[in-house]
Image (cartoon, grey):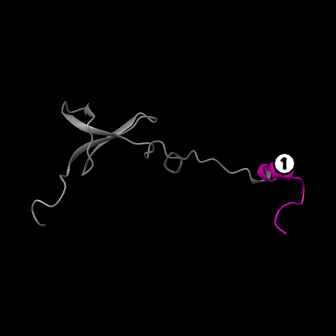
């Protein structure tokens, strides 16, 4: 690798506030906000919307789509038989 052209690859904490989950990893991403980690050191922290602790695929809390209810609601709203012809 050429020196001086790559971004810094340093420890960063990614935090999912909705799930109360955080993990320390290395990344080129950075932030002005910091957090004190379990080891007593301070690291930049990046808040994320979804992580493996809150995503339905990983947590097993996926919702099953109620297609029959959706069809009935469509027919109530627009009348029966207005679907694909």
Q: Residue at x 46, y 35 (%)?
A: 18
Classify 10 Å Cα crowding around label 1: few (below 14), some (14-19), many (20 and above).
few
Under circle 1, the secondary element is helix
Task: Please say if 3 is above or below 36.
Answer: below
- Residue 61 is a magenta residue: no
Quarter containing the N terminus: bottom left
Q: Which residue is mark 1?
A: 77
Q: Which residues are magenta?
A: 69-85
Where residue 62 sits in the image (x, y, percent)?
59, 48
Where residue 30 sits: x, y (%)?
A: 26, 45
x and y percentages locating residue 84 in the rendered image:
81, 66
Q: Is residue 33 left or right of residue 67?
A: left
* Residue 24 or residue 75, whichever sits in front: 75
Asked if residue 43 is positioned above or below residue 84 in the image, the reply reads above
Q: Residue at x 27, y 41 (%)?
A: 31
**Which residue shows up at 79% across the image and 48% down it?**
69
Please identify the quadrant where the C terminus is shown: bottom right
Quick check: 68 left or right of 16? right
Left or right, residue 51 beside residue 59: left
Left or right: residue 8 compared with residue 57: left
Q: Residue furthest right?
A: 80
**Residue 85 higher or lower than 12, as above or below:** below
């Amino acid at each position: 690798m050429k020196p001086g052209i790559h971004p810094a690859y340093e420890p960063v904490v990614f935090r999912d506030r909705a799930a109360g989950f955080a993990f320390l990893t290395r990344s080129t991403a950075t932030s002005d906000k910091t957090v004190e980690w379990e080891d007593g050191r301070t690291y930049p922290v990046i808040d994320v919307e979804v992580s493996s602790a809150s995503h339905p695929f990983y947590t097993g809390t996926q919702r099953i789509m109620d297609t029959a209810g959706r069809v009935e609601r469509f027919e109530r709203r627009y009348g029966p038989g207005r679907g694909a012809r």
